[in-house]
Image (spheres, rainbow, N blue to C red):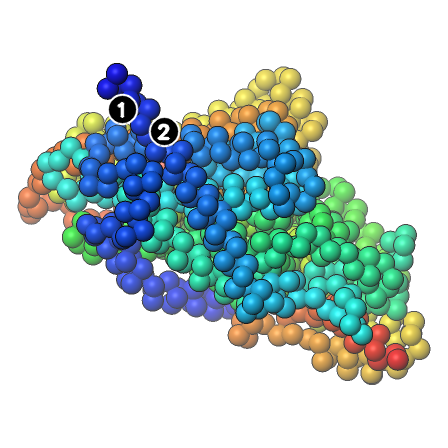
Amino acid sequence: MATNRGFARPYWVAIRYMIVATVVLGIAYPVAILGIGQLALPAQANGSIVTVDGAPVGSSLIGQSFTDADGAALPEWFQSRPSAAGYDGAASVGSNYGSENPDFIAEIEARKAAIAESDGVAEGDIPVDALTTSGSGLDPHISPEYAYEQVSRIADARGLDEASVRQLVDAFVQGRDLGYLGEPTVNVLQLNVALSQLVR
Amino acid sequence: MEAWLLIAQLATLAIILAVIYRPLGDYIAYTFTSSKDLKVERGLYRVVGVDPTREQTWGAYLRGVLAFSLIGVLFVYALQRLQEVLPYSLGLPAVPEGLSFNTAVSFVTNTNWQSYSPEVTMGYTVQIAGLAVQNFVSAGVGIAVAVALIRGFSRRSTGTLGNFWVDLTRATFRILLPLAVITSIVLIAGGVIQNFSGFTEVTTLTGGTATVPGGPVASQEAIKLLGTNGGGFFNVNSAHPFENPTPWTNLFEIVLMLAIPFSLPRAFGKMVGDNRQGYAILAAMGTLFVVSLAALTTFEIMGSGTGTQLAGGAMEGKEQRFGIAASTLFATTSTITSTGAVNSMHDSFTSLGGMMTLFNMMLGEIAPGGVGSGLYGMLIIAIITVFIAGLLVGRTPEYLGKKLGPREIKLASLYILTTPTIVLVGTALSFAIPAIREDVEGTSIWNPGLHGFTEVLYAFTSASNNNGSAFAGITANTPWFNTALGVAMLLGRFIPIVFVLALAGSLAAQGKVPVTAGTLPTHRPQFVGLLVGVVLIVVALTYFPVLALGPLAEGLQ
């Protein structure tokens, strides 16, 4: 009998331990962080929401597509990178294409042709981020090069002069963190919000 | 340019880790040598029915580890199966049996392989009360086992290694929880969300709709990295802007993954009474890390491969805010620890770049490896190294004053053989059994050709080494992969732990051999060089053929 109890003992301890751990680590801890986040850093904790005239238009951290209902790019908006998730915030995903995958190669070629036509640039001048999908499928940024590359199309579509659109991009270029971490970026949603106000 | 960015980043990282090495390592050592229990700990021990003063033999210690892990699997399994009736489940149904098994095993074994897409599978309650709890305690188990092995070296002529429940408690509540609280607040400041809002629809500038996800992400993110777990709150893990919003949070997350594994050698040195031993282990870990990082970054900057060249660079699957240098540093960190988090899609890396992430795991995740598991893995290699050096000069090998006799060498060798066996057998079976092969090739593999083979090899390497990252194009939510990877994770976690604890027991039982002129010094650069050499030779001999079938062949085409 004594040996039976000895064998079962760690399991009873484990069950009781798991209950305590679940209460402390699984409930008290995240709820405490929730409280701190909501009180001290509510804007970030709630998703860095961007508003226009008081109405939310998205999160500055979650990329969006600027397309019509059929998914065709709208020439009057800065376009985000291609996305394997179609910028569905409920289904983040990357393409996971290997470099030799024929589908991948075909998609790069199709994007090259489409952008060369819509933006009036040589295929060789299109920045790499304009041709490749991001890891998350929700990348909120494009490179400054891709933003500048779109200036003339946007100026054309909106009847603005290129210089003022270019100036707008200048203001939204974000350098590397600390000067050397990551890459320079332009936040597409924030840029487009400013663009829409420029028109008004 | 990329190279300089990488060097500046790496230098920053090295300085931060150097600054915390001593205080954190000393604190860890103090945590496991102090005889005092905190008041709340005494309360906990009373509630769960543990006598904290009671020392355990290696067998009793192991039974504690196994019992706790089994109960953990049952808890996480039950929570997933009951999801439909749990609060804050976002209307998601119960998780199917096979996937629940795989996921429960995955989080209990500190692997955090995810056969599922969290957004559409796991509600908030399963995430925080099931998965995140294991993020803490599975890491705590890893640290406890490493501490037991250190005690094997530091103790003399005793049958006991400490008390598992006490070690688990101290690792979890004195080390992991305080760090997680502080770092999750830092993450929120950087833009990581912490709410229970579910998915919010907004009307966009173009008149369409966009979905903004919610969730208690920051609390999960901090322990996911600190515990080298790696299971993402979202499908794309740390590539998701709500898990990793900026380049500085990216570096911060890398620090979190490395902080404890790189500080454990200090705790080890301190506990065996010779800090130089800790520095030697640290030097071997650091060398492997830097060399591997340099190789991966070089391959990604070179950007070879048809599609990559056509696009003009290796940016497929990488975020603009991170670019190449911040992606390769994260990928190296994640695969060379046992984390398995990703901030870019490894499946889309160049062939040779992807091979480096595989190679990091094949090293056995010892440079610096997972919390606890990295240190015990490296100490096993150190034992093998001392043995080989002993053979060269014809002396009985000794390490840290302990004789390494046939029993010790057998246990260390079995440890080294376990994981590769699981990896290679699992991969081979996926292609050798016709019915399974058809399913693997028809359903699971995403990229055609050699790359598809690498996806399967990666899955078994990741599961068996308890990493959890993936060549994520693979569809692993199938009966074969849910079962086979689940078994691989279990065997890859607990068989090595059996050997480690048995070894710790037999070392603790020995007295101390005095150091003589003939003793191999294990704190000098010569030993560090030998250690690194043994790691590379063992890995190369074991895995070269299988690498040649996949990424090497693809990369050299």
Q: Tell me which residue sits at (27%, 33%) in the image.
A: B61
Q: Amino acid at mark 1?
A: Gly
Q: Amino acid at mark 2?
A: Tyr
**Residue, disc 2:** A11
Q: How many marks?
A: 2
Q: Is residue B231 above or below residue B205?
A: above
Specify the quadrant of the image occupied by residue B123: top right
**Where is residue B190 drawn, in percent x and y?**
56, 66
Q: Chain of mark 2?
A: A
The chain letter under disc 1 is A
N-terminal of the pair, mark 2 or mark 1, is 1
Task: Residue B364: name its quadrant.
Answer: top left
Q: Which of the image's four quarters has the C terminus of chain B?
A: top right
Question: Crowding at label 1, few (<14), some or many (≥20) Cα neighbours within 10 Å?
Answer: few
**Side of B457 relative to A57 (left or right):** left
Position of B416 compared to B476: left or right? left
In front here: B223 or B53? B53
Marks 2 and 1 belong to one chain = yes
| Residue located beneath label 1 in the image | A6
Image spot of residue B166 (x, y percent): 28, 43
Q: Separation of disc 2 and disc 1 at Cα?
A: 10 Å
Q: Picture coordinates of residue B322 (x, y %)?
A: 59, 62
User: Is disc 2 placed on a helix, strand or loop?
Assistant: helix
Q: Residue at x 54, y 61 (%)?
A: A35
Residue B466 seen in the figure? no
Q: Nearer the viewer, residue B435 or B57?
A: B57
Q: Which mark is residue B237?
A: none
Q: Which residue occupies 54% across, 22% down?
A: B429
The location of residue B289, given as percent across then percent down, is: 41, 53
